[in-house]
Image: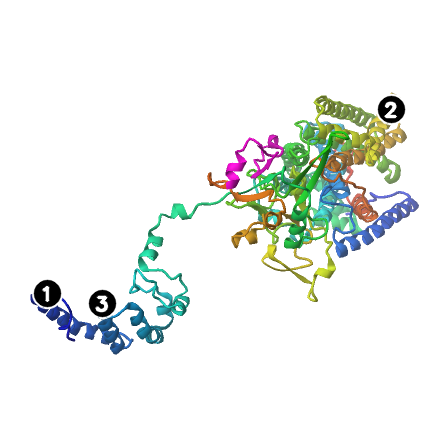
Amino acid sequence: MSQSDAPGFDEPLVNYESMLEDHLEESLEELEKTEYSTDLGIMMAADARRVSNGELSSAEYWEKYDEAALAEFGEEYARTPNPAVDRVQQTIREETAETLSCDACSLPDVAEDVDEEPAEDDHIPQWGMVIDLQKCVGCESCTTACKAENRTPPGVSYNVVMEQEHGEFPNVTRTHMPRPCLQCQNPPCVQVCPITATYKMDNGITTIDYERCFGCRYCLVACPYGARYFDFGEDYDDEFDEEGKVEVPEYGNKRSLEDTTGQAMKCNYCHHRLERGEEPACVETCIGDARYMGDLADEDSEVAEMASDQRAFRLKEEQGTDPNMYYLK
Amino acid sequence: MSTRSYQFGFEDGRVRVGWYAIIAVGLLVGLYGLYVRLTTGLLETNLTATVPWGTWVAFYIYFVGLSAGAFLVSAMANVLGMKSLHVIERDALFVAVISMIVALLFIQADLGRVDRSFNPLFHRQGMSVLSWEVHAYALYIGVLAGELYFSMRKDLVTVSETGSGIRATLAGLLTLGRTDTSPESIQTDRKWLKRLGILGIPLAIFFVHGGTGLLFAVNHSISYWHTGVFPVIFIISAVVSGLGLVIALYVARSKFFGDHLSRELLAGLGKLLGVFILIDIGLKALDTIVGLYGMSPGKVETWYLIVFGENAWAFWLMVLFAWLIPLTILSRRTWRWSPRMMVVAGLSVIVGVIGTRFVIVVPALLVPDMDGMPAGVYAGTAEEWILSAGFIALGALIYTVGAELLPLKPLEDDH
């Protein structure tokens, strides 16, 4: 294969060319050994050289070979990020990127991701909540949103709003205090469970294993905030379809009448929503923007800043539960 | 070898029929309760998220206490060497085993998922008192059964070899093949009986019943329970109820089965009962004073509900039947020597301590966890009570059949 029309210095070019010619002979032999098409390999290699010489753009190159390569190398080709992509312009066609099932990015970017210190990526959030009682108007839309989101049975309300009136007429004030699960760092409910059916995740959220709980209700007794509930077997029957099932994201699938009957239930900060990068339903719905959800382990986060505010307090601190739930008075 | 007809049971056939008829009524009613429980789960109870424990949990701790108390009476006989108590040792052990079975039935009924009731044996959790309790109960039932076996084996061999009919057959099976009655073998039995008793005493005091008290007391969330003396009170009231049961059975056996009755032993048991009732009152008074002295809202409110609330019946049942009536009877020497008066004292205590257990479970849970949350309302439903009646009738049935068939009273009085 001739490279005579390539730009460059006269003398050394000849040497390089002969070296390449020699190498090519060996490459042919090597290519013959594989089960894949030798011709395609030679053509792609030749044009790859033109790309590096600037005679051909990589976009044109992939235009020419992508389909053939996919046909020849199949699944494995589709799954491999392509090293020969132009660094400056992201030139993999969108369809190709989709078949590669990777973000359209160049190899150096991929390499950067791979080489990254795992510690930074492994930052484990401590999900916490801050509720500004000055902003809460007691509309209970959080309670309603929670019921609608989690489809909890009658008598089960992961979020409630407590009301208190202070003073005497005409100097009366009213405080509304919403109470989801406080996601304690030392949860008594977890401590008392005899079978580890309830456990605390490293992101700070306490949840229940509905395939293990045997319904002794010790956790309901142990929770100092009354934040645990029990499915005594009642249900809103008209919610269920003909198969006796209702779509409940909390359980990751359709819940049947029996799935939670006889078991303890509790708020898990809408874990299914958190996993999608969404806020819990109660936070999202709050009309007065009184509820804030965030990572308390991140000192710069909004919730961490609010939690260290002078107005911030926590409920029943003397119980040693260390809740990840702050109120602003 | 001549065969003898051993007759441990009722002397009067009419009394037998009458007693079994009462049990049958209890069982039939309970059977309906069981049907409701199995078909509707916990729907027919009045339990809520605010009051998650109720009648069945109260009866569960009642029967655990009855068992521990009866066992401790038997332990006084074989470990502390109180010879005069030997005649009631087996009866106390037998009733202790049955009480544990009834207690476990109550807790089974209370579980939301009965099908998973063996989970504590597969998934342990070292921080949970309840997890430890389940294992303590299992070990304790083993100790009780072992003691009963070693205590009764000699007589079982005698009955199986010299008796006839179902009693001889059953006795033969229960000897588990150890039919040697040489002095060495009897000595081995006594040795193991004592060993199991020594293991059983701390097990019953600190784990089985102290542990059940601990299960409540560790909850910081419920200030009425959260005191150091709370588990101790559990143990004392357990001994009170256990002594009451043993006294009532001792008198009933002499009246209906024709067993010999030692008035001296009865008076001695009466004195012991009186002492334990006074300790029970004293400890409860101390706990109450400590609680109310600080005027902590949770405790004051709980005490108000205990004495004046809708469930105040339990407190007054306790005061009247577990304290005042038995103490009045036990205060007079002539009444302590009277089987008629003593059986009243024993039965009164058995009923009164039910009140003690309800006082523990229910009012404390009625107090809302936080101001602004709904206050609890609880009274057991008919369904809860009839299943309870069924379980109690079942316990009575097992005891009566056992008492009629087994040599629960030593065959020789010197023993």
Q: Amino acid at mark 1?
A: Phe
Question: At which x and y percent is residue B97?
Answer: 72, 41
The label on residue A9 is 1
Q: Quadrant of the rendered structure where residue B203 is?
A: top right
Q: Quadrant of the rendered structure where residue B65 is?
A: top right
* Residue under the point 39% across and 45% down: A119
- Nearest to viewer (mark 1 / mark 2): 1
Q: Is residue B143 visible?
A: no
Q: Is residue A23 visible?
A: yes
Q: CA distance from mark 1 to mark 2?
A: 123 Å
Q: Amino acid at mark 3?
A: Gly
Outermost residue on the front side: it is: A170
Query: In which chain is the residue bearing label 1?
Result: A
Secondary element at tag 3: loop
- Say how the picture is coloured: rainbow
The residues colored magenta run A302-329
Q: Which residue is mark 2?
A: B328
Q: Which residue is mark 3?
A: A54
